[in-house]
Amino acid sequence: MDFPVINENFTGIINKYGYAQVVDSVATSKTGLIKYKMIAKLHFDVHDKENKQFISVEYHALQEKQFCSGVQFVAKKNGIHEDDGWVITYVHDEEVYIIDAKRFSDEPIAKITLPQRVPYGFHGNYFYKK
């Protein structure tokens, strides 16, 4: 897993959730480029069912031969809970996926096709319009 993010409204406290991209080791080995096959929601306060030394992880998998860039968490304007918001990522070639953080494993609530290809990138930020 790489480049974890949290809901920035909860910075400085013990977090319940984090979000990260997951490396596809096979595709990365074949191409020599780091490729991310899925996104993970890390449940910091829940132990893994099989090994209590690890935390619980929920995955949002992409389709075959799809890869994503870094994720960004966008908090709902009046959100109360730490996972009140959306996880956003670019999906190679030209789509943006918006995933409801509370229903993380479900299909994205929106898939936006962009007019051109978005180059691979690792980081993203979201800024609210003031």
Image (cartoon, grey):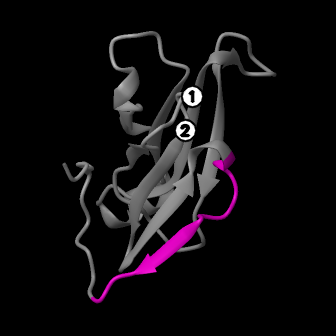
58 lies left or right of 23: right
Mark 1: secondary structure? loop
Specify the label residue 81 is tagged with.
1
Q: In the image shown, does 89 or 33 lie closer to the viewer?
A: 89
Q: Nearer the viewer, residue 11 or 24?
A: 11
What is the three-letter code of the residue carrying label 2? Asp
Magenta-drawn segment:
103-115
At mark 2, the secondary structure is loop
Q: Is residue 48 left or right of residue 20?
A: right
Kind of residue sitting beneath label 1: His
Instruction: Check the image and name the residue furthest to the left.
Output: 130
Regarding residue 63, the answer to whether it shows in the image is yes
91 vs 128, nearest the viewer: 128
Contact flag, marks 1 and 2 (Cβ < 8 Å): yes
Q: Residue at x 29, y 60 (%)?
A: 33
Locate the N terminus by quadrant: top left
Most common secondary structure along the magenta stretch: loop
Q: Does 38 sit left or right of 52 as displayed?
A: left
Residue 84 is marked as: 2
